[in-house]
Amino acid sequence: MPALGLAAPVVVLHPRIGDSAAAARDLATQAGPEGLDAVLLGLGGERARAAAAALATALPTPARLLGTSLWAQDPVVAREPALADAWFPGPDPATRAGFDQRYQAAFGDRPPRLAGVAYDAAALASRAAREGQDAPVGQPMLGADGPIRLAPEGLAQHGLALFAVDPSGEPRLVQPAPIPGSPGS
């Protein structure tokens, strides 16, 4: 990070059953009077609510709270005022809705969450088999949850949308999913 002119990150880990308030105070102490730009909460549900409330009182200046993609399916986080406008990544909702509709039309039921992963894997494998060595390396395609591409080293890269926690309980789209590998993604 120093090479980019950024301060080293402050990392505070606490036990799974640890005290969120104590972790928040520890983070505030390490951050110093200048505060923090953002805090990533690797928690969900009631634990995320408790941590956010503790951070709101412990930090000298508010920090942007960030969460995980699990927050997209977690209505509990929306009930915490300290989590309002916190950001988290998630699948592109419009693309996923289209996949869900096609799946339901074909099989008569809503798809399980992992159906999208299976669909993407099969589509990437089919493309590689069809195009062989002529396949353009890294060319993106539209997967079940948004843009996806197979990187030259064989890893699947997904473009995820950026959402904000909204007190209404419905995540608010902040930025649509970028195409993986494109500038700024």
Image (cartoon, rainbow, N blue to C red):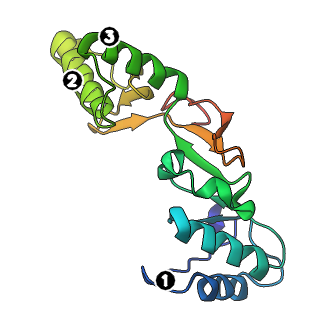
| Quadrant of residue 114 within the rendered picture | top left
Task: For label 3, count other residues whose C-alpha is less than 10 Å away and answer few (under 14), some (14-19) or many (20+).
Answer: few
Residue of label 3: 105
Q: Secondary structure at mark 3?
A: helix
Where residue 57 appears, x then y in whole percent? Answer: 78, 79
Q: What residue appears at the point 65 percent right and 81 percent down from the top-left corner?
A: 24
Q: How many marks?
A: 3
Q: What residue appears at the point 53 percent right and 45 percent down from the top-left corner?
A: 72
Mark whose residue sits in front, 1 or 3 = 3
Please, is residue 91 above or below residue 123 in the view? below
CB-based contact (under 8 Å), mark 2 and mark 1: no
Residue of label 1: 14
The N terminus appears in which quarter of the rendering? bottom right
- The amino acid type, in three-letter code, at marker 3 is Ala
| Quadrant of residue 131 within the rendered picture | top left
Where residue 99 appears, x then y in whole percent? Answer: 39, 19
> Alpha-carbon distance for marks 2 and 1?
39 Å
Query: Does residue 126 appear to the left or right of 50 in the view shown?
Result: left
Query: Does residue 80 appear to the left or right of 159 in the view shown?
Result: right
Q: Earlier in the sequence, mark 1 or mark 3?
A: 1
> Alpha-carbon distance for marks 3 and 2?
19 Å
- The amino acid type, in three-letter code, at marker 1 is His
Residue of label 2: 122
Whether residue 9 is visible, yes or no, is: no
Whether residue 169 is visible, yes or no, is: yes
Q: Secondary structure at mark 1?
A: loop
Task: For label 2, count other residues whose C-alpha is less than 10 Å away and answer few (under 14), some (14-19) or many (20+).
Answer: few
Where residue 23 appears, x then y in whole percent? Answer: 59, 84
